[in-house]
């Protein structure tokens, strides 16, 4: 009796139903057995495309479309209140994988990359929907559930794809069919989601006053359980609200008022040295991460051609995803004063990433390349998790969306420049090995930037007057509880 009562109480929680649906959607939409073998499939007998066509002409279209669509989709997501954009994302996934199964030719694959860009740009709807339909008390919990579902779907898809290819010798085309079926199942899920009454920017009716003012509320306080107590932070961003921005008769905010508010928030957020440092690393490293992940399969194809040898891309993607998730989880047990050691940590781990990419590129051994790739992804996921919580802990969810959106946009802008110069046939159009040498050098430059930033901060602390230095030292070492 007591157990049944407890179960009914859990099921009656208003946050549980949309969270379960989002987790199911994330699981199926990320379940892609074809993903680890995409380059091999495009260059294989089913599509018969050349390496130059795949790497230099087709793949860059995803970067360009993602960049162009990111901010329009962000605003449309908020104005339409998430659910329609989730349905657009699900539809784009179906179109993407239907074209992967049926379409032929470079132009068709470029159009496929555009639709995949629509789908990835719509991720903002997935990650922000939940904050509009659940209480702030549950933000941390539902975020963890959704991210775990995505990682589980990705890992399970890679594992199934590898098992089918290695054990059953299934054609890569059938992996694409399975991915299409999974995307079709995912399409059915968002229809059951409730339509939010409010959103982060345009629709403010019933919004939490903490969210409107931008002050950190419950989720940020709960975030202290995951990382260093944010009393460690060098700043605590406060926000003023423009009362005139809210339309009194409908609780909605006009486009110009939203853009004005976003610009003011942008200036205030990036005036904080701590948020700026972590955001700079976020943007720079995410640019390099996208490039390495996008073109790793092409590198492996050159080291060990799939038409002549068995490949194990699926196992590598599965292991790197799970280790990345484990590395992210370990952040909750790390007690470090990131204000003091942040730049040094970013420098050190950026060196690790640079070395891993260099080994992937120069040691012509597939197993060394696989292992280096696993180290690369696990290290990135560890640092991006730290950066996420360091940025988010002092921000309201409204500013969370803004800062992460800006960081991603800058990353995509840098990636576009890198792609145009290094990859695109209209630029240098380099072969895959020189490309990865450039990516390794890119992360080495990131390491140098944060080494110089760390030295500058150390010198600044040393030259501070004794009273300020003593005060800052005792403040930075405040233990977390």
Image (cartoon, rainbow, N blue to C red):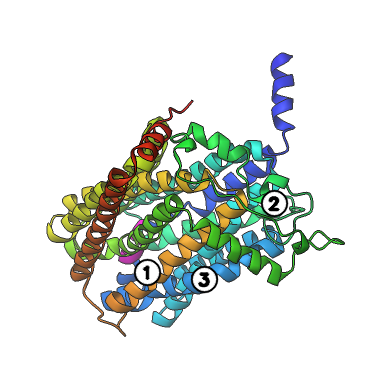
**Mark 1 against mark 2, which lies toward the viewer?**
2
Q: Name the residue tied to disc 1.
A: 415
Q: Name the residue tied to disc 3.
A: 115
Horizontal and vertical percent position of residue 381:
37, 47
Callout 1: few (<14), some (14-19), or many (20+) C-alpha neighbours within 10 Å? many
Q: Are marks 3 and 1 in contact (CB under 8 Å)?
A: no
What number is the disc on residue 212? 2
In this orientation, which residue lies closer to the viewer: 40 or 473?
A: 473
Query: Taking 477 as reference, is 250 above or below it?
Result: below
Which of the two labelled residues, at mark 2 and mark 3, occupies the earlier sequence position?
A: 3
**Mark 3 against mark 1, which lies toward the viewer?**
1
Horizontal and vertical percent position of residue 395:
56, 48
Q: CA distance from mark 1 to mark 2?
A: 33 Å
Q: Tell me which segment is drawn in magenta.
A: 36-40
Q: Quick one: quadrant of the N terminus?
A: top right
Provide the major secondary structure of the magenta segment. Answer: helix
Q: Residue at x 27, y 74 (%)?
A: 51
Quick check: can you spot residue 175? Answer: yes
Q: Residue at x 50, y 63 (%)?
A: 406
Callout 2: few (<14), some (14-19), or many (20+) C-alpha neighbours within 10 Å? many
Horizontal and vertical percent position of residue 224:
50, 34
From this viewpoint, which residue is outermost toward the top? Answer: 1
From this viewpoint, which residue is outermost toward the right? Answer: 249
Q: CA distance from mark 2 to mark 3?
A: 34 Å
Which secondary structure, mark 1? helix
Q: CA distance from mark 3 to mark 1?
A: 18 Å
Q: Tell me if residue 39 is in the magenta stretch.
A: yes
**Mark 2 against mark 3, which lies toward the viewer?**
2
Which secondary structure, mark 2? helix
């Amino acid at each position: 009796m007591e157990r049944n009562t407890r179960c009914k109480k859990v099921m009656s929680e208003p946050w549980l139903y949309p969270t379960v649906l989002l987790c199911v959607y994330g699981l199926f939409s990320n379940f892609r057995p074809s993903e680890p073998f995409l380059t091999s499939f495009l260059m294989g007998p089913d599509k018969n495309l050349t390496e130059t066509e795949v790497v230099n002409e087709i793949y860059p279209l995803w970067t360009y479309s993602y960049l162009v669509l990111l901010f329009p989709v962000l605003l449309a997501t908020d104005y339409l209140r998430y659910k329609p954009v989730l349905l657009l994302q699900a539809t784009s996934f179906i179109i993407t994988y239907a074209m992967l199964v049926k379409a032929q030719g470079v132009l068709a694959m470029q159009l496929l990359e555009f639709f995949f860009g629509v789908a990835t740009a719509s991720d903002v709807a997935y990650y922000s929907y939940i904050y509009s339909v659940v209480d702030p008390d549950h933000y941390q919990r539902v975020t963890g559930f959704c991210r775990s579902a995505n990682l589980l779907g990705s890992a399970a898809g890679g594992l199934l794809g590898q098992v089918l290819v290695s054990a059953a010798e299934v054609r890569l085309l059938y992996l694409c069919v399975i991915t299409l079926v999974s995307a079709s199942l995912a399409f059915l899920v968002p229809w059951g989601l409730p339509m939010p009454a409010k959103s982060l920017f345009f629709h403010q009716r019933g919004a939490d006053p903490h969210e409107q003012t931008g002050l950190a509320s419950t989720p940020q306080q709960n975030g202290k359980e995951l990382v260093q107590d944010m009393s460690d932070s060098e700043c605590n961003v406060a926000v003023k609200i423009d009362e005139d921005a809210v339309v009194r008769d409908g609780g909605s905010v006009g486009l110009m008022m939203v853009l004005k508010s976003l610009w003011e928030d942008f200036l205030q957020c990036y005036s904080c040295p701590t948020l700026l440092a972590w955001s700079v690393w976020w943007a720079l490293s995410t640019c390099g991460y996208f490039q390495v992940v996008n073109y790793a399969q092409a590198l492996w194809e050159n080291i060990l051609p799939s038409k002549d040898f068995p490949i194990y891309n699926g196992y590598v993607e599965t292991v790197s995803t799970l280790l990345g998730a484990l590395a992210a989880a370990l952040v909750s047990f790390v007690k470090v004063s990131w204000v003091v050691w942040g730049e040094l940590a970013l420098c050190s781990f950026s060196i690790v990433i640079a070395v891993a990419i260099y080994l992937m590129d120069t040691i012509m051994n597939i197993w060394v390349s696989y292992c280096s790739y696993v180290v690369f992804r696990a290290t990135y996921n560890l640092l991006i998790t730290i950066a996420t919580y360091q940025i988010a802990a002092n921000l309201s969810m409204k500013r969370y969306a803004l800062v992460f959106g800006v960081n991603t946009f800058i990353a995509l802008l840098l990636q576009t420049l890198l792609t145009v110069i290094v990859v695109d046939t209209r630029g240098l159009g380099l072969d895959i090995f020189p490309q990865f040498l450039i990516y390794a050098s890119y992360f080495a430059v990131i390491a140098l930037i944060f080494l110089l930033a760390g030295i500058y901060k150390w010198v600044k602390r040393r030259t501070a007057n004794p009273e300020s230095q003593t005060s800052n030292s005792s403040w930075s070492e405040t233990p977390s509880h």
